[in-house]
Image (cartoon, grey):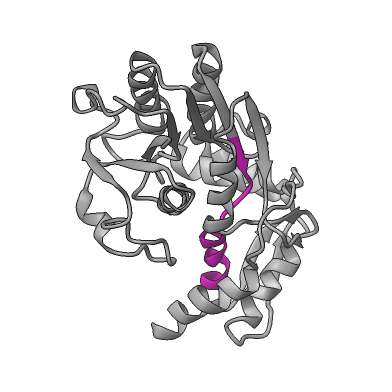
Amino acid sequence: MQRVLVAGTSGYIGRYTARAFKKRGWFVRVLVRDPEKLRHPGPFGEPALEGIVDEIVTGDATKPDTLHDITDGIDTVFSSMGLRSSKPGRTYRDVDYLGNVNILQEALHHDVQKFIYVSIFKADEMMEMQIVKAHEEFVQALRDSGIDYSILRPNAYFPDMTQFQKMAASGAIVWPGDGNLTINPIHGEDMASVCVDTAARGHQEINVGGPDVFSYKELFTLAFTTIGKDPRIIFIPLWIVKGIHTIIKPLNARIADMLYFAIAVNEIDNAAPRYGERHMKDFFEEFGGKRISEK
């Protein structure tokens, strides 16, 4: 029986991937800071893992002394671990880069065969962002380590898109650019299947998107219709957003990062190779629309 350590199991992709490995017959050990979180499903349908996985180990990837022997007897490490947003005392570099390096060091010490890591689609075109830089610094460390690896680059996940339903519920979606660029987000269960597939031997770097490709304008319209509202979309010329970014950058790094991301996604087409069979419309209706109607 193949044995995997899954890091990042408090998050959307980590939960689905841990379950997917188990369904494929693997022994699954998961690393988590707070085991209590695994007793309950996640907010977007992610599975509870208590009683599903074989072993839960408690540790903090940013503290190497809590990670001793987490990869003992493990064949493959999978990590989707990362900081969701920059917080006081914990930076993207601390978690996305150094935390994953600490896990990688344990993997190398125990002669793990493969390391699978989830990074960011078209990262090389968004390196000004701290989160992207941290991801890619670890990618380079992984490439340099000598271990067999797979790097997955999803463009977006379904829960990320519910922000547009929240904006729609407030009355209007305001967006830079003209809304004509495209994106195809992927459901966590479909992404997990791709992740497990890459456990096969051999270096791989794979771009991943879902089955449905939307222009942003089409996606925003879907966000409105799935909550029963008429679309009201306001597009702001990109040059105005760039000007605001230039002013904000020396004053507030967090807001500048958000503006830079908004600019970047409106200068890069985000459609990725299609995988999976779950659809954005169904997810919007099940989770986003329901959450908004309950408020």
Residue 6's x, y, as percent?
38, 39
Residue 192 placed where, x, y %? 53, 50
The reply to whether residue 170 is in sight is: no
Q: State the quadrant of the N terminus.
A: top left
State whether residue 273 is above or below residue 3. Answer: below
Question: Residue lying furthest bottom in this view?
Answer: 228
Going 36% across and 47% down the picture, which residue do you hit? 9
- Residue at image location 57% in from the left, 62% down from the top: 161
Name the image quarter holding residue 165: bottom right
Residue 159, visible in the rendered structure: yes
Direction from residue 76 to residue 120 in the image, left or right: right
Q: Position of residue 73 (x, y in %)?
A: 32, 26
Q: What range is drawn magenta here?
A: 152-167
Q: Is residue 64 above or below residue 193?
A: above
Residue at the spot 30% in from the left edge and 35% down from the top edge? 90
Which one is nearer the viewer's eye here, 101 or 70?
A: 70
In the rendered image, the vertical position of residue 63 relative to residue 174, given as above or below? above
Secondary structure predominantly adopted by residues drawn in magenta: helix
| Image quarter of the C terminus | bottom left
Quadrant housing residue 263: top right
Magenta stretch containing residue 123, yes or no?
A: no
Q: Position of residue 94 (x, y in %)?
A: 35, 28
